[in-house]
Amino acid sequence: MDDTMGTAILSSFDKYTVFSYNGKKITFRTCDNLERYTKVLLWDNGYLEVMAKYKHLDYEIEEYIDLIPVLESLYMDKNEFLKPIKEVKINYV
């Protein structure tokens, strides 16, 4: 996927969530039991609603990710980083 066209990528590994766009990868700690994200329900300029599968559950649950505090703690210009993102897709390689 060409992230220069406004598509960011969400994935996870171990205890971490990865959000990448335009050559930048933001990695932050998440729940120990997260197996994987399965679907993006909403992207709203830094706020995500997603479906997630957890190891201890037989079903998916709705989760919420707010990237604003993460970007602020990394001293990143949130407006500059988020403005060109039009959609978020899940991708596991």
Image (spheres, grey):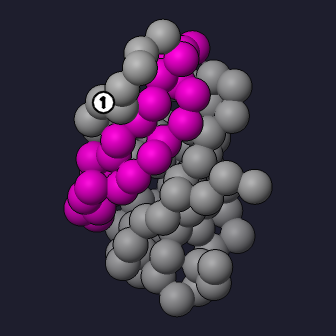
Given residues 75 and 26, the one toward you in this image is: 26
Judged from this view, the residue extending furthest toward the front is: 58
**Picture coordinates of residue 87, whole percent (x, y):** 38, 72
Which residue range is magenta in the image? 31-55
Residue highlighted by disc 1 = 61
Examine the rendered structure and indicate whether residue 68 appears above or below residue 89: above
Q: Secondary structure at mark 1?
A: strand
- Where is residue 6 drawn, in percent x and y? 47, 82
| Mark 1 Cα-neighbour bin, 10 Å: few <14, some 14–19, many ≥20 | few
Q: Residue at x 53, y 24 (%)?
A: 34
Residue 70 in sight here: yes
Q: Residue at coordinates 52% horizontally, 89% vertically from top-left?
A: 5
The C terminus is located in which quarter? bottom right
Extreme residue in the right direction: 93
Quadrant where the N terminus is found in the figure: bottom right
Residue closer to the observer: 76 or 39: 39
* In the rendered image, the vertical position of residue 52 relative to residue 56, given as above or below: below
In the picture shown, does residue 41 fall above or below 5?
Answer: above
> Looking at numbered disc 1 in the image, what kind of residue is underneath it?
Ile
- Name which quarter of the figure residue 78 lies in: bottom left
Q: Is residue 28 visible?
A: no
Magenta span contains residue 19: no
Residue at 52 percent across and 57 percent down: it is 90
Q: Position of residue 69 (x, y in %)?
A: 37, 39
Q: Main secondary structure of the magenta part?
A: strand
Q: Position of residue 20 (x, y in %)?
A: 60, 60
Q: Residue at x 36, y 26 (%)?
A: 59
